[in-house]
Image (spheres, helix red, strand yellow):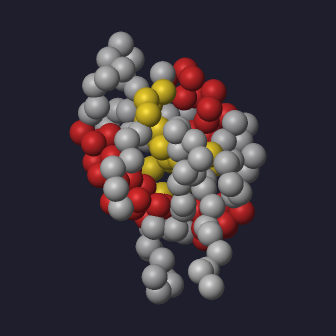
Amino acid sequence: MLKGINPLLNADVLQALRAMGHGDDLIIADTNFPSDSVARQTVLGKLLRIDAPAADVVKAVLSLYPLDTFVDDAAARMEIVGKPNEIPPVQKEVQKEVDAAEGKPWPMISIERYAFYERSKMAYCVIQTGERRFYGCFAFRKGVVPPDAE
C-alpha cells in the first residue's frame, strides 16, 4: 500500500500508466471483451487486470492519468450494437467518474463495436476489469502533466 494512490492500482498497472506518453491509448474493458487476444497486439503486449467494477477502475486510473485536451476523442465508450445513442447504466457510472476527475462535464464519444476493437489493438495497453455488465468498455487517450507554475 502507498499513501495517496488508490489501492486498486497494482504495480503492473502503475508501471504501464507511468510508461505511457502523450497520445497513447488505454483500454479499460469488461469481462466479455476479448482482452487477452487484443492485449497481445498492443504496445505492452500483455494483459493487465483489476478485478473491480468498471467505474471503480476508471476512478482509480483517472486519479493519476491525465486526459488529452487536444483531441475530442480522449474519452470514449463502446456503443451498443444497433443503438448507438443508448447509454447503459455502466456507461453512465463511468461518465460520472470521468466528469469528476476532470472537474467538469467531459462527454465520452461513442465508437462502433468493431471500430472499438481496432482502436484497442493500437492502444498502449488493456486493463480487463471484473465488470460483468455488457458494454463496460472504454478508451482513454493520455494527456500531459504541465510543469509546476513558477
Quarter of the figure that contains the C terminus: bottom right
Q: How many marks?
A: 0
Residue 72 image point, x, y percent: 52, 39
Q: Quick check: 38 left or right of 5?
A: right
Q: Residue at x 49, y 34 (%)?
A: 33
Residue 50 image point, x, y percent: 48, 57
Compared with residue 77, is residue 49 higher up or lower down, i.e. above or below?
Answer: below
- Say if residue 126 shows up in the picture: no
Q: Residue at x 65, y 75 (%)?
A: 147
Q: Quick check: 70 left or right of 28?
A: right
Q: Residue at x 43, y 29 (%)?
A: 110
Q: Quick check: 8 left or right of 88?
A: right
Residue 149 image point, x, y percent: 59, 80
Q: Residue at x 35, y 32 (%)?
A: 134
- Say if residue 115 shows up in the picture: yes
Q: Quick check: 112 left or right of 36?
A: left
Compared with residue 38, is residue 10 higher up or lower down, i.e. above or below?
Answer: below
Q: As drawn, which residue projects farthest toward the left? A: 89
Q: Which is nearer the eye, 27 or 95? A: 95
Q: Which is nearer the eye, 149 or 133? A: 149
Residue 66 appears in which quarter of the rendering? bottom right
